[in-house]
Image (cartoon, rainbow, N blue to C red):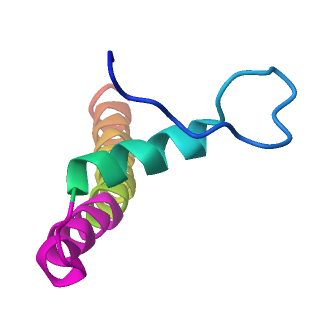
Amino acid sequence: MAGITYPEASGNSGGGLDFEAQLWAAADKMRGHMDTSEYKPACLSLIFLKYISGGFAVKREQLWLERVRTHCKQNEARYK
């Protein structure tokens, strides 16, 4: 983006910018001069959604495997 400068990362062997430094600078730029109490609920909500989506993916996979196993057992019994 034009006009945005990111801090140089120390110890980066590629000579470019460190990814974490870029993210931090972008977050600071978007946050602006907001107080912590103003943006904390949004950040915590995003962290919670990430946690829940990971748990949902695991549970969905378990349910899918259970359904496939049940279906296979039913077909085996049907065609014996």
Residue 24 x/y as whole percent? 46, 51
Q: Camera-side residue: 31 or 53? A: 31
- The magenta stretch is 33-51
Residue 72 x/y as whole percent? 36, 35
Name the residue at the bottom extreme: 37
Q: Quadrant of residue 68?
A: top left
Whether residue 68 sits left or right of residue 12 in the image: it is: left
For residue 39: magenta? Answer: yes
| Chief secondary structure of the magenta portion | helix
What residue do we see at 37% from left, 42% from top?
A: 26
- Quadrant of the image containing the N terminus: top left
What residue do we see at 28% from left, 38% from top?
A: 71
Up/down of 11 relative to 56, above or below: above
Residue 53 x/y as whole percent? 28, 56
Whether residue 47 sits left or right of residue 13 in the image: it is: left
Up/down of 22 relative to 61, above or below: above
For residue 73: magenta? Answer: no
Name the residue at the top extreme: 2
Q: Quadrant of residue 73?
A: top left
What residue do we see at 71% from left, 40% from top?
A: 9
